[in-house]
Image: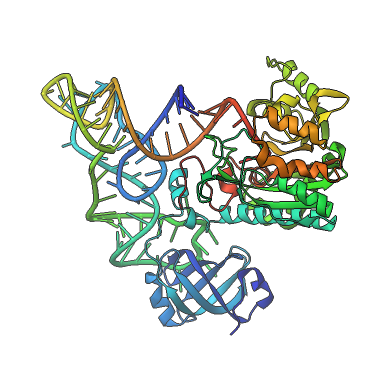
Amino acid sequence: MAIVTINTVGKHEDQSVTICGWLTHKRSSGRIRFLVLRDGTGIIQATMIKGETDQQAIDLYPELTQESSLAVTGTVRRDQRAPGGYEILVAGIEVFQIAETYPIAPKEHGVGFLMDHRHLWLRSPRQRAILRIRHTVIDSARKFFDDQGFTLLDAPILTPSSCEGTTTLFETDYFGNRKAFLSQSGQLYMEAGAMAFGKVYCCGPTFRAEKSKTRRHLTEFWMIEPEIAFADLGTIMGLAEGLILAIVEAVLKTRQPELQILKRDVTKLEQIQPPFHVLRYDEALQILRDAGESIVWGQDFGGGHETMISNHFDKPVLIHRYPAETRAFYMKNDPDRPEVALCMDVLAPEGYGEIIGGGQREDVPDILEQKIQQAELPAEDFAWYVDLRRYGSVPHAGFGLGIERTVAWICGLEHVREAIPFPRLLDRLHP
RNA sequence: UCCCCAGUAGCUCAGUUGGCAGAGCAGGUGGCUGUUAACCACCGGGUCCGCGGUUCGAGUCCGUGCUGGGGAGCCA
């Protein structure tokens, strides 16, 4: 007897199969009983009818609780009344375990309760849809880079000092007399990689010990960060557009059922077509001023500002050449206009905010050293980084794409916490 | 760190002017010959977040602490 998965059950019409899965819920009416099974690939209804189903299985029905693990054997039948079009006419049931009373009832629950039960919440259709889309986002992004000759280069998680210097870091004292920190970006290491491989990217977790408590923030989140040698700001702006297009295309192509579960308006995703809108910081500033915001040149945009800008457009917006003051020390200033940096952000549509940040890196050793000093960073920690400019320095650029914000945007989520299997937030570490 | 909101049954919530603690779901029992979060009847289930105060009387009003949620700043 072949064990088949629910998504392939249609190929076995009128054949006897075994399905291994969990009972999501059950119903009965007189002499007919229904089990709804989930196996990770789909959901199917199993039907027990007196006279056609083994009496032993029918007698088992009252014992079967939500989330009990079962192997159900029976005949695959096409039936209009069954969700999914097919059902199993049960011959027999083998029980792996009768589950205890399951905390997550088929009804609405509060966020706090669901977060406390995240390990079980993952079983619900909505969460599975989101996390499958996350898989596709990461997978398609990696394919995009792989196909263009990038090398995956994993960045370290434990680092001797800050990549950016400003944000709060997670500290560990494991390394004796010197502190170590959890990485907040793999970028500096990708720059070293770009000088070795030409084009590299990393994809991994990053950590920010900021006391941020908003729907866009996680304490631990994932980034995919490409870095390219012999490249300038324009190169990576094109790369960013191509990456987002590739991700959206892959999700639309392979995740329609999941988007449907999420009730996502796919027309919003279908209109993500090239070319994206490209604005200078000054132009974005003008949009805000026209909307009545009193914002002065030199100020960075807040979350509300980003939403206002992105609401002007129906696809992602690239904003470039922000005031250098608002950017990290490693950004190269525009030689034609030194008060702005050769940097760019990509704002997702529908108010999802910044999903990409990047730019061209400072490639002159003396200027970089000055910037490190101005940022009041310990020179010795960055000596290796300056070395990259001493031994064959080249123009190079890269960016980081936030996985969870991208997933939240594509899925149309209210909060990034659902875009990662086990979210770590301010004051939330469990489960 | 700051601002706003909430905390009542396992879960989601209602609880009037301060006057006997409630419903739906989940759980249990029974019924129903095709259900779609099935339905119907019945049953069990409470530190009303903690502490202090006002009052004849507090789930309700006041103070305070804790927990959770939303937002700001900062960021992806």
Residue at coordinates 85% horizontally, 23% vertically from top-left?
A337
Q: Position of residue B73 (x, y in %)?
A: 59, 25
Q: Position of residue B28 (x, y in %)?
A: 30, 64
In this orientation, which residue lies closer to the viewer: A347 or A236?
A: A236
Q: Please state if A342 lies on the left or on the right of B8 as rendered.
A: right
Residue at coordinates 43% horizontally, 78% vertically from top-left?
A57
In this orientation, which residue lies closer to the viewer: A81 or A243?
A: A243
Q: Please state if B68 lies on the left or on the right of A232 as rendered.
A: left
Quadrant assignment, res A357? top right
Residue at coordinates 64% horizontally, 79% vertically from top-left?
A14
- Depicted A70 relative to depicted A352: above or below: below
In this orientation, which residue lies closer to the viewer: A226 or A402?
A: A226
Is residue A328 visible in the rendered image? The answer is no
Q: Position of residue B23 (x, y in %)?
A: 33, 45
Quadrant assignment, res A279? top right
Quadrant assignment, res A79? bottom right
- Depicted A250 relative to depicted A241: above or below: below
Q: Please state if A361 lies on the left or on the right of A52 as rendered.
A: right
Q: Position of residue A217 (x, y in %)?
A: 58, 39
In this orientation, which residue lies closer to the viewer: A202 or A90?
A: A202
Is residue A2 visible in the rendered image? The answer is yes
The quarter of the rendered structure image containing the N terminus of chain A is bottom right
